[in-house]
Amino acid sequence: MKRFILAALVGTAATSGLLAQSANDVIIDRAQQPTTPPTPASPASKAGTDEKGDLDGGTQRMAETRKLPFKLSLAYDLQVFYTDNVFLQPNNEVETVVIANTLVARAEGNSIAVGQGLLLPSLSLVYQRYNHDLFGGDQARQNLDFDAYSIPFQLRYRCGNNWEFGFGITGTAVYSLEGPPDYNLTYKSISTALTARKLVSLGRDHILSFGAGVTYFITDAEAPAGPLGFNADRNDKIDYTVDAGYYYLKDRWVVGPYARLTYSDYLHFQEGAFTDVSRSDLTGSIGVSVSYSITPWASARIYSSYDWRTPQGDEIVDYSYKSANLGAGATLSMSF
């Protein structure tokens, strides 16, 4: 049971769906939803602001009076999606419907002028609950259910010509909802990330986004006792990621196909009986999302993705998989 949870978590930790996209938080996203660009603002937010698109300077807005030295935002996201391979296995795939709830509280400091750009610090608290057996009755799927708590700290630097660079540190703890024992800490990690993103305007309603990043994970996973166990830090790794996306923004609609590749280099991976192996994986994802801003504080979306993983090392176990996902989600948010 715990092995399945770790396989699902380590294989799918990524920049999250639409909720985390707006907050630039690193959280768990089993559905591999596409990452939207950090600018421009969402269509719904254009009401009541004076915006002018500028390829060099980005989106310009009228200054707003703020009493607090930071902007505080709260958000709740619900997504329901179908996946045809919930255990991320190379064969004997098992399908299910997953429900994911996410709560985010985020404080973003006032921007600081540095050189020719702006530095934006932020700190978030993220809570997630994933339930993997919507209709009940299957214990193996229910054993995957978990709660996750994350604290991402980020520094983003926006400069001319629509470039953005980022540095982030995120602490994460994952608790299994199934016993024994109940609510058991199964996985924790600290990740450090460096990112870069370039936006290219193709006109008023069209944007291309190109991104790259390197993330170093220090992990501690619960390991079974006895001679068939493994070291708790066997999931330590470095991820190298590139992605590209196209975004069409029209009124309250945003349509965004994307593609992403991640090369994972495990630093000291082990199989059972403390057997050291050289493990590296290439994970890909392609998909599309369609979102609609109902109000300035509510939005809905549908999305689909196809994901795959190809082992690149000499590991004993076959960690390859293919997975298709189709889902819908809704987000409520407020800021002050």
Image (cartoon, helix red, strand yellow):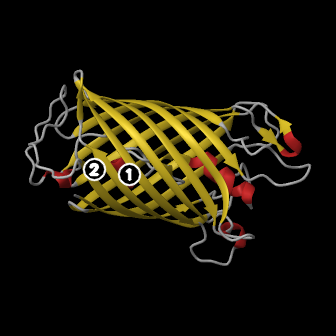
Q: Looking at the picture, how far across and down is residue 94, in whole percent?
A: 67, 62
Which label sits on residue 254?
A: 2
Q: Looking at the picture, how far across and down is residue 105, in whole percent?
A: 37, 57
Q: Would you place residue 256 above or below residue 263 in this image?
A: below
Q: Is residue 228 left or right of residue 283?
A: right
Q: Would you place residue 76 above or below residue 201 in this image?
A: below
Whether pointer 2 and pointer 1 mark residues with C-beta atoms closer than 8 Å, the reply is yes
Which label sits on residue 200?
A: none
Q: Would you place residue 97 above or below residue 324 in this image?
A: below
Characterize the local packing of mark 1: few (<14), some (14-19) or many (20 or more) Cα atoms within 10 angstroms. Answer: many
Q: Quadrant of the N terminus?
A: bottom right
In-front residue for pair 71/246: 71
In-front residue for pair 142/75: 75
Q: Is residue 72 left or right of residue 51?
A: right
Q: Residue at x 42, y 46 (%)?
A: 34
Q: Looking at the picture, how far across and down is residue 300, in whole percent?
A: 32, 62
Q: Which residue is mark 1?
A: 289
Instruction: Assign a secondary structure to mark 1.
Output: strand
Instruction: Assign a secondary structure to mark 2.
Output: strand
In-front residue for pair 303/240: 240
**Which residue is outermost to the right?**
227
Q: Residue at x 67, y 38 (%)?
A: 236
Q: Amino acid at mark 2?
A: Val
Q: Residue at x 65, y 53 (%)?
A: 187
Between disc 2 and disc 1, whose residue precedes? Answer: 2
Is residue 177 visible to us here? yes
Is residue 88 visible to us here? no
Q: Amino acid at mark 1?
A: Ser
Q: Residue at x 63, y 56 (%)?
A: 85
Q: Looking at the picture, how far across and down is residue 238, in whole percent?
A: 60, 32
Q: Is residue 170 left or right of residue 253?
A: right
Q: Quadrant of the C terminus?
A: bottom left
